[in-house]
Image (tube, grey):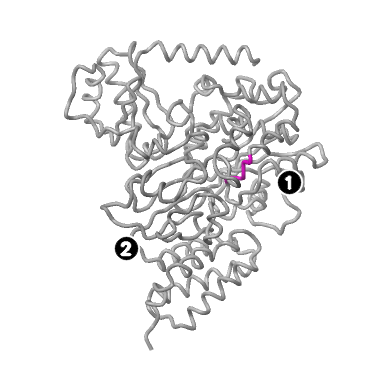
Amino acid sequence: MNLEELLAIQKETKQKRQQKPKQIRCCIASGCLSCGAESVKKSLDNAIKEAHLEQEVEVLGVGCMGICGRGPSIEIDPETTLYHNVTLENIPAIITSLNQTKTSENLPPQGDLNHPFFAYQKLIVRENSGKIDPDNIDDYIAEGGYQQLHHVLLEMTPNDVIKEVTKSGLRGRGGGGYPTGVKWATVAKMPGQQKYVICNADEGDPGAFMDRAVLESDPHRILEGMAIAAYAVGANHGYIYIRAEYPLAIKRLEKAIQQAKRYGLMGSQIFDSPFDFKIDIRVGAGAFVCGEETALIASVEGKRGTPRPRPPYPAESGLWGDPTLINNVETYANIVPIIREGGDWYASIGTENSKGTKVFALTGKIENNGLIEVPMGTSIRTIVEEIGGGVLDQGTVKAVQTGGPSGGCIPAHLLDTPVEYDSLQKLGTIMGSGGMIVMDQDTSMVEIARFYMDFCQEESCGKCIPCRAGTVQLYDLLTKLVERKATQQDLDQLEALCQMVKDTSLCGLGMTAPNPVISTLQYFRDEYVSLLQVT
């Protein structure tokens, strides 16, 4: 494959799409598939054939359209008509409507692309989601896919690439927020011939599905981002570590890797350059602790997925003792647009210390559940009340949980807080990988804290005592509170134990496990006190 061949595929695919005046894009990501999208797409295919419209209408399976709570969703172009909750009974009416002169009462609910849910978003990571067929590499190439890999291999030095990523201000989207350019530069300067890049796709936070949706919708974007990263740091081998609970994402990644190999975009001397790169997939059993870098590396090596003390950091001594770069899915998905548009462009979006956009899985007691991408600095209120449409059944927001089990609950009176790394940390929570759960007025915050502690005690790997025993004791104390058997002494012990687990645990799981308890105690202490046993 050379650039001329890549551009020829791009041109040919675009011309092919333009041959048919109409296109029906049907979401085939997990959210819509769980609501029957596969049957809807098959039915649309059959109906188009029966109506002899094959030469005029193309039905295309595409990735996530975002508003997952109203699936299955389809969009008809060029009119950009969006339909939600599509059923098999709606298909005849949809086919009839293609003729624009006829309408039917049996059409599904129509979406409004000018609604704040869509209008307030800025798509960088998800720019291809809902538009291209994730199973077709030609669709990705038609959108400019793999041109940035060619650009860096033939026109940039590894140091140039790292400078551009550093200039962008991109911080790791896996939760820690470490500067991506600094991490890449650290791995690049390490001695040794063998280095690795790893994509952390072990998304385990309750309520989070950002990485899964990106992988299901645009797998080649991740492969290209990893290849650029590998070139920059001097690696020739990459691994994608993904949990077994994501079978569709695994299937599409496997297919994407095979397609890239077939086109010569992965393997030896890519684009006739000296750069060799291959990617393997490692399927994890679904242990939350394997989201931690050293535990993940141990699992890739075939060992039990438990963390180890740092330093040395993976950048110095990672997979099989070699320098290793680990970034998560969303971080790699940002690389192609950063190279294409430039680091300055990316840095112009967001806030001073949090650049670019952030993808959130917006869930909970809210009207518009789904996947959103907003510029850093967007207020939580805008996300919840405008994009999310507010609480179900005209209820009121009580709190918003960010960062999953490692994060905390933000009370309603702080909803004007901008979404950025530092502002969330000041409130006692974190950005995390991007889960955002909205809670209404009927939610018990003590029950919420107990739910997350139940999760953490189950997911503790057991290697260090503070996490192994501490999370169990915290869960028991919270249960005592919920059952109205706790005393003031138990509440004092709960607070002291939170601090001990936080200060003495070995890895991030234990260090952050008490956060939901600490934040709910900070903002909703009266609920804890009201549950104390009356003596």
Q: Hey, which quadrant is residue 334 in on the image?
A: top right
Quadrant location of the C terminus?
bottom left
Q: Does the stretch in magenta take in 214?
A: no
Extreme-bottom residue of the structure: 535
- Disc 1 residue type? Ala
Q: Is residue 256 above or below residue 535?
A: above
Q: Hey, which quadrant is residue 398 in on the image?
A: bottom left
Residue visible at 68% across and 39% down?
Answer: 166
Q: How many marks?
A: 2
Residue 103, percent from left and from top: 18, 23
Residue 121, percent from left and from top: 44, 38
Q: Which residues are magenta?
A: 169-173
Give the Cα distance between marks 1 and 2: 46 Å
Specify whether 417 is left or right of 265: left
Residue 315 is marked as 1
Look at mark 2 in the image and give the residue it sits on.
442
Q: Secondary structure at mark 2?
A: loop
Residue 400, percent from left and from top: 42, 56
Q: Earlier in the sequence, mark 1 or mark 2?
A: 1
Closer to the camera in the image, 460 or 407: 407
